[in-house]
Image (cartoon, grey):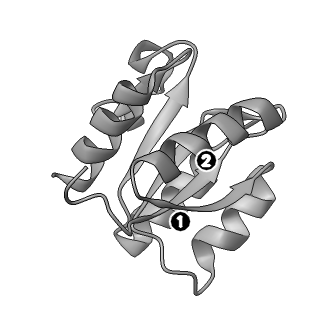
Amino acid sequence: MDGLAGKRILVVEDESLVAMLIETILEDLGCTPVGPAASVDEGLALARGNAVIDAALLDVNVAGRQVFPVAEALAARGVPFVFSTGYGEAGLPDEWRGRPTLQKPFTEDAVQTAIRAALSL
C-alpha cells in the first residue's frame, strides 16, 4: 500500500453498490475517496472544482452518458485516471485507449494495480 496512503481518488460511478464497494476498497488501500459522483455533471463539478484529486476512477457509462467530458477535465488538470467498464479497454474509443482500464467485475487487487499504474507507483 506504500505510496497510496492519503491519496485522494475521485470516484465517478452511478451504481450505488459498486460505488460503495470502490469506496471500501480505496479506504482499505489507505486512500480517501472523493465523491462518489453519480452523474457526469457531478463528476465534472468535482473535476473542475478546487478539490485536491490525486487520481480518479471513472465508470465509462454513467447513467446513460459517457464519462469522457470528466476525463477531459481531469486530463486538463494533469490528474491521472482509470476507466472502469464491463467491456475492458476494447470498449473505449481509440483516443482513450492506452489508459489504465479496470474491467468489471473487479477485485481489490485489480483496483490497486490500476490506481498504481495511473499514479505511476
Residue 114 picture quarter: top left
Mark 2: secondary structure: helix
User: Residue at the spot x=64%, y=44% of the render?
Assistant: 67
Camera-side residue of 13 and 73: 13
Mark 1: secondary structure: helix
Query: In this image, 53 relative to 70: left or right?
Result: left
Find residue 36 and name its label: none
User: Residue at the spot x=30%, y=58% of the render?
Assistant: 4
Q: Label 2 neighbourhood size at 10 Å, few (<14), some (14-19), many (20+)?
A: many
Q: Is 43 situated above or below 115?
A: below
Q: Quote the CA–CA distance across marks 1 and 2.
A: 22 Å
Q: Residue furthest bottom?
A: 50
Find residue 23 and name its label: 2
What is the three-letter code of the residue carrying label 1? Ala
Q: Label 1 neighbourhood size at 10 Å, few (<14), some (14-19), many (20+)?
A: some
Q: Residue furthest left?
A: 121
Residue 88 location (% of width, % of height): 45, 16
User: Residue at the spot x=36%, y=26% of the render?
Assistant: 110
Query: In this image, 59 relative to 99: left or right?
Result: right
- Residue 99 in sight here: no
Residue 112 location (% of width, % of height): 34, 38
Camera-side residue of 5 and 85: 5
Q: Is 27 situated above or below 92?
A: below
What is the three-letter code of the residue carrying label 2? Glu
Q: Is 10 situated above or below 91?
A: below
Residue 65 picture quarter: top right
Q: Mark 1 or mark 2: which comes first in sequence?
A: 2
Find residue 73 and name its label: 1
Residue 117 location (% of width, % of height): 23, 42
